[in-house]
């Protein structure tokens, strides 16, 4: 048996040796697969040691910020002096004076500049005189162009003159015709006014003898007043009929017995029913008011009733319109909110009553409003037509004066028309003479010799001289100290007749005006290329000063350079310049130059979010973020988490943890301890 086994193994290995490369590869793959299965299902996880207190997960604020350090200086602080060298002629400011932008602070003598400007102006004048002499003597192209242009313009005026003159004549004639029409209308008005005045005088003399002598205006007024008075009685009657119809249905009074009329008492909304009943009695009161007004006016003669009295009385119709519209809409809502019953109304009847007692009542209300409007128009026309004898006399006199004025204007217009015709004839004659002269000038211009090259040269000289003068005038600003910002003068060592050196020469005796904005300070920063992309102009910052540890100042980035300080070479690792400006809290704060300042720029911020300490998070073998989570008193597990924003202390947890969970505040594995060469647990503690 043993021999057979040995023989079998010998044969097997012989076979493998013949196929050695192929089988060696298969065996290696099988061994690797067996190891993976064993390590996944049977190998125990490495024991992990923790040397940390338990941490309770809570919420907190997390911010990602950038910290920068430099020193303070005053914003826009400068020492100003002159560009040119000379003597000070005026100083227009003093220490602690507030200076506005573009204010002139001081000036120096401009003698040299004045002489240069005067010389240049003389040169310009001489050049212009020289040009004028040449142009007067001969200028072929320019003179021909001027003569041709003048001739063409005059010919054009000759062609357009008849139409222009005709238009002027037609306009004047139209004005005269309009005046003639106005005179005819005014004469007609005057005749009617005289007739009315005559009738009024006749009526005043014979009014007691016969009513037939009353003039038409009086009769029209009486008829209108009588109709307006009668309208109160008719309106009261119509309103009473409307209220009676509603009363029959609702049985608001004891006028109608139960058996004779269908009584509506089945409204679901009692509030609407109560409002409708209340409104019924409000409108019912207007019947008496209308009757009282009719009685009041009927007791007077028509001449005793004034238009203002009637207008004031007709205001009741406008009030009644408001009440009727309100009542109609209340009834519509009330009827729709009704109950069908065999003792009361069917749904179709309810709908009919809702529409009837809404639209009918509202329409009647609008009729009352129309009555008021019509009365206003009628009374206005009565006042216009109601004329006394004295008014008629004034009207006759006024129309006579207006007619005389129109006749005078007509006479003036006729005279002006005659003058216009004479003037147009003179203009035509003068234009003909100008055209003949222009023809002569054009012929002469074509015979002259040209000197165009010399003229162009002089014109170029004139242009250059004018530009030189403009440049010199701008130089006057160099002889002034001009504010380019709103400042406060903090120091002044310059006075009138001081000698000023040029600004590009260093001198201990140089004179300056010191200015600054003491309320506005700045911090000039150097920011590396990694951080410069994180900030932008107008981004808010917080400024902390060592001299004022309890104060926080709000500021902004006012300037950020796009070119590095150490050059633009590709391999340059230079920093970028940036400026932060901030303002004092109080004028009394003594924030001076070169005080240490810390700048905090909040780049990202999240408030009241779930956070854990940074040491509590580690990476597992799959590069996932995990924390050690307490499941029970004896069980701890590695919990995979999703993280968010981090700062120097905490990290935001986005998922898989909740508030008040217990984790290890410091997560250190055995591998990490070994890598750190720590062998004693007490040493780690």
Image (cartoon, rainbow, N blue to C red):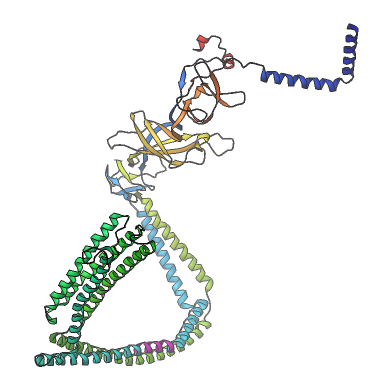
State yes or no: residue 420 in magenta.
no
- 26 with respect to 1 (left or right): left
Q: Position of residue 322 (x, y in %)?
A: 26, 65
Q: Residue at x 37, y 31 (%)?
A: 544
Q: Position of residue 24 (x, y in %)?
A: 82, 20
Quadrant of the image occupied by residue 324: bottom left
- Asked if one can make out residue 466 in the rendered structure from this viewpoint, the answer is yes
Q: Nearer the viewer, residue 460 or 600?
A: 600
Left or right: residue 678 compared with residue 288:
right
Seen in the image, is 623 located left or right of residue 82?
right
Q: From this viewpoint, which residue is outermost toward the front?
A: 259
User: In this picture, is 376 found above or below 410?
Assistant: above
Q: Main SS type for the magenta part? A: helix
Is residue 648 among the parts visible in the rendering? Answer: no
Give the magenta part as a residue range. 162-172
Q: Is residue 163 magenta?
A: yes
Along the viewing direction, whichever of 447 and 585 lies nearer the viewer: 585
Above or below: residue 62 compared with residue 282: above
- In the rendered image, residue 451, in percent from the top left (x then y), is placed at 52, 74
Quadrant of res 680: top right
Quarter in which the N terminus is drawn: top right
- Who is closer to the viewer here, 369 or 601? 369
Identified at 41% across, 86% down, the residue is: 164
Count up the numbered dots. Answer: 0
**Relative vertical location of residue 40 with respect to residue 143 in this rendering, above or below:** above
Can you give x and y, in whole percent of width and height, for residue 73 in the image? 37, 36
């Amino acid at each position: 048996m043993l021999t057979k086994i040995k023989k079998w193994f010998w044969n097997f290995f012989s076979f493998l040796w013949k196929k050695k490369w192929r089988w060696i590869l298969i065996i290696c793959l099988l061994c690797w697969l067996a190891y993976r299965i064993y390590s996944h299902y049977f190998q125990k996880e490495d024991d992990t040691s923790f040397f940390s207190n338990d941490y309770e997960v809570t919420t907190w604020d997390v911010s990602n910020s950038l910290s920068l350090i430099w020193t303070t200086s005053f914003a826009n602080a400068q020492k100003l002096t002159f560009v040119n060298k000379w003597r000070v002629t005026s100083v227009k400011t003093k220490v602690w004076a507030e200076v506005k932008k573009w204010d002139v602070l001081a000036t120096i003598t401009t003698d040299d500049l004045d002489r240069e400007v005067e010389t240049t102006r003389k040169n310009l004048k001489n050049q212009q005189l020289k040009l004028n002499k040449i142009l007067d003597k001969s200028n072929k192209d320019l003179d021909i162009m001027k003569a041709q242009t003048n001739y063409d313009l005059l010919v054009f005026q000759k062609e357009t003159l008849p139409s222009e003159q005709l238009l002027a004549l037609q306009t004047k004639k139209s004005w005269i015709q309009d005046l003639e029409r106005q005179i005819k209308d005014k004469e007609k008005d005057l005749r009617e006014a005289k007739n009315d005045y005559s009738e009024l005088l006749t009526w005043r003399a014979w009014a007691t003898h016969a009513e037939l002598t009353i003039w038409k205006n009086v009769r029209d007024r009486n008829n209108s007043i009588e109709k307006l008075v009668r309208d109160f009685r008719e309106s009261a009657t119509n309103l009473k009929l409307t209220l009676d119809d509603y009363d029959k249905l609702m049985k608001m009074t004891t006028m109608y017995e139960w058996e004779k009329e269908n009584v509506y008492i089945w409204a679901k909304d009692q509030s609407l029913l109560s409002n409708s009943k209340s409104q019924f009695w409000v409108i019912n009161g207007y019947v008496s008011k209308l009757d009282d007004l009719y009685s009041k006016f009927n007791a007077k003669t028509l001449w005793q009733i004034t238009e203002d009295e009637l207008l004031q009385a007709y205001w009741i119709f406008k009030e009644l319109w408001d009440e009727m519209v309100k009542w109609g809409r209340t009834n519509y809502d009330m009827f729709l909110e009704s109950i069908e019953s065999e003792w009361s109304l069917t749904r179709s009847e309810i709908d009919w009553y809702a529409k009837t007692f809404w639209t009918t009542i509202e329409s009647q209300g609008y009729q009352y409003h129309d009555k008021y409007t019509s009365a206003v128009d009628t009374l206005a026309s009565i006042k216009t037509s109601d004329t006394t004898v004295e008014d008629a006399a004034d009207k006759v006199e006024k129309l006579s004066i207006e007619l005389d004025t129109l006749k005078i204007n007509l006479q003036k217009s006729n005279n002006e028309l005659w003058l216009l015709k004479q003037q147009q004839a003179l203009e035509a004659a003068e234009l003909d003479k100008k055209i003949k002269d222009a023809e002569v000038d054009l012929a002469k211009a074509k015979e002259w010799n040209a000197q165009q090259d010399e003229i162009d040269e002089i014109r170029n000289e004139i242009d250059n001289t004018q530009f030189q003068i403009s440049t010199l005038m701008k130089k006057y600003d160099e002889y002034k100290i001009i504010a380019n910002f709103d400042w406060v003068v903090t120091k002044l060592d310059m006075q009138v007749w001081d000698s000023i050196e040029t600004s590009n020469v260093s001198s201990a005796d140089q004179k300056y005006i010191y200015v600054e904005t003491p309320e506005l300070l700045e911090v000039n920063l150097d920011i590396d290329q990694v951080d410069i992309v994180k900030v932008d102009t107008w981004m808010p910052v917080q400024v902390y000063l060592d001299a004022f540890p309890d104060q926080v100042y709000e500021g902004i980035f006012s300037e950020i350079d796009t070119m590095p300080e150490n050059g633009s070479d590709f391999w340059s690792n230079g920093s970028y310049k940036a400026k932060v400006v901030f303002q004092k809290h109080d004028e009394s704060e003594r924030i001076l130059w070169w005080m240490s300042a810390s700048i905090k720029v909040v780049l990202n911020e999240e408030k009241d979010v779930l956070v854990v300490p940074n040491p509590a998070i580690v990476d597992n073998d799959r590069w996932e973020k995990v924390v050690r989570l307490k499941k029970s008193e004896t069980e701890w597990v590695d919990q995979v988490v999703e993280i968010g924003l981090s700062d120097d202390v905490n990290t935001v947890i986005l998922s898989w943890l909740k508030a008040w969970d217990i984790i290890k505040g410091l997560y250190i594995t055995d591998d990490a301890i070994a890598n750190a060469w720590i062998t004693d647990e007490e040493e780690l503690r």
